[in-house]
Image (cartoon, rainbow, N blue to C red):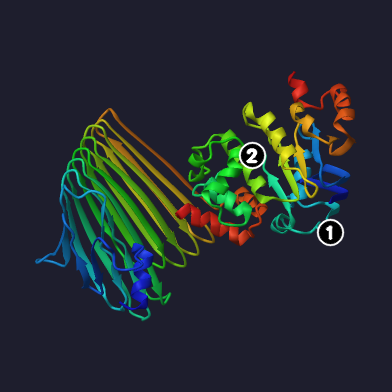
Amino acid sequence: MDKIDSELLLKVADLHDIPSGAYNIRKNGQLLGRKCTPGIDITSKTDKPGIDIKIASSVKNRSVHIPVIVTEENVNDLVYNDFYIDSGAEVLIIAGCGLHNDGNAGNSHNGIHEFWIGEGAIVRYVEKHYAEGVLTTNKVLNPSTIIHLAKNAKFVMETAQLGGVTSTERITTADVEEGASLEIKESILTEYNQTATTKFEVNLNGKSSRANVVSRSVAKGNSSQTFISNIYGNNVSFGHVECDAIVADNGKVASIPALKNTHPDAELSHEAFIGKIAGEQLIKLQTLGLTKAEAEKAILDGFLK
Amino acid sequence: MLKLENVSFSIKEKGRTKQILKNISLEFKPGKNYIITGANGCGKSTLAKIIMGILPVTSGKIYFEDQDITTLGITERARLGIAFAMQQPTRFKGLGAKDIISYAAGKDCTSSSACEYLSKVGICAREYLERDLDNTLSGGELKRIEIASVLARNAKVNIYDEPEAGIDIWSFNGLVDIFKHTLNKKNLNIIISHQEKLFKSADEIILMANGEIKMQGTAKNIIPIINNYSNVCKKLEVD
């Protein structure tokens, strides 16, 4: 690993060093390192690029790091990662992708992640995306996340696009069975001419299933974002969607939530806000001694944290 | 410490000039609690915002420790040592009490030091530290955190714009204690209020009406006059 690799891994997976738990690190489409731990098994797929990650029921409070970095131009990495979480397991999965590109030709990473989460299992999935390098070179990240939640399972997804990504199309779909819950917190920063589209499609199929999708976005420069979320209440269920966006300069955001019930006892709601930083927020922080620029940064950093 | 000389402020409304403050001259000395009172719309909150630099003067001068600060912005005045508790505290998504108190103190506060300030305003501190200052907090909780943020600034001039508004029964005695106990020889408090119960914390009371200073004096001298001054105190109107 060189300095760029280490910095990218720190940024997208909070890795200061090789992780103590299980991990699989992929660089420029190749395996950089892997470690399995008791109950956590990682194997390469034989029919297509990607890995299978199997987590046994005995696993409690363990973590798996599976970051991907792409540091060369012209590398367009496609990967299929499948996660099989046995019933009752409790695990933290830290994914994340960092792109570095000093060249003129673009690079990209398309990560297709599918989760089968067993009965009563609890998964926290943290995914950060970041790109850096020549501003005008295309750096593209298109993650797909497919989540199947069995009875009483819980999935918390914290996903953040930290900046630098020229374009992204993020697709997340979930089916939620009886008593299971899905919690998604997404934050996306776009600047310059970047574009981001994020789509959620959640089917609340089981009795007392729940989903809460919260998205916060900041669109600066000439960037634009589209947030689409479709929640279907197909049973006695609860679903909520929230999309807050702060725009600056000429940034544009479209928030398109759609709620649909096919069951009379589904309870679905959404709220959305698009606007600039409130003047009174700036004034408050200025009265604490921050300059206007410092106040703006504090507000945006806090909003996206 | 703080001096206002012939401060006036006017706005344009429907093409006409409306004068909000008329030739206000005041001097605030360290070691004292000042209460500025008067009916709604008399200009007292405007005056507070003028001192903080949130609104500009139309004419007149403001001096802080003999320095002319009339043209200085909010940040510069804050850094010189003026603090301000807003009448209606701002809500933030993504910033919590600990963040605000850290910014106010000018350093990264530990949980325990942030807690100290929150304890002074009577809220059970730790549970509030990480919570965002968003819609999940009540107006009263936000107001207390707002006051704590001023305490954390350790400023020379502390302006409280209607500190009692929106808070519960704790407020009066708790606020009076805060105004008394935070006072020293090097600072002063300016409290905008029409709540008579706070008057007992004042060393001086300034009564405003129609954008002008009508009266100024010690609490002992002024309160009886205010009591007879119809239409001045909202509290008295309600009573």
The image quadrant where one finds the N terminus of chain A is bottom left
Q: Residue furthest left?
A: A46
Which of the pair A172/B5 is nearer the observer?
B5
Q: Is residue B10 left or right of residue A68?
A: right
Counting labels gives 2
Relative image position of residue A49 (x, y in whole percent): 16, 67
Examine the rendered structure and indicate whether residue A233 appears above or below residue A227.
above
Q: Residue furthest bottom?
A: A103
Relative image position of residue B224 (x, y in whole percent): 87, 24
Relative image position of residue A5 (x, y in whole percent): 33, 74
Q: Residues within 10 Å of mark 1 (few under 14, many from 20)?
A: some
Which dot marks residue B68?
1
**For residue A263, which quarter of the picture?**
top left
Q: Is residue A48 left or right of residue A272?
A: left
Relative image position of residue A208 (x, y in whole percent): 26, 32
Which of the pair B42/B14 is nearer the observer?
B42
Examine the rendered structure and indicate whether residue A79 appears above or below residue A116.
below
**For residue A296, which quarter of the picture?**
bottom right
Q: Amino acid at mark 1?
A: Asp
Which dot marks residue A86?
none
Q: Amino acid at mark 2?
A: Gln
Which residue is denoted by mark 2 in the rendering? B88
Examine the rendered structure and indicate whether residue A61 appears above or below residue A152.
below
Which of the pair A173/B140 is nearer the observer?
B140
What is the secondary structure assignment of the residue under circle 2? loop
Examine the rendered structure and indicate whether residue B174 appears above or below residue B159.
above
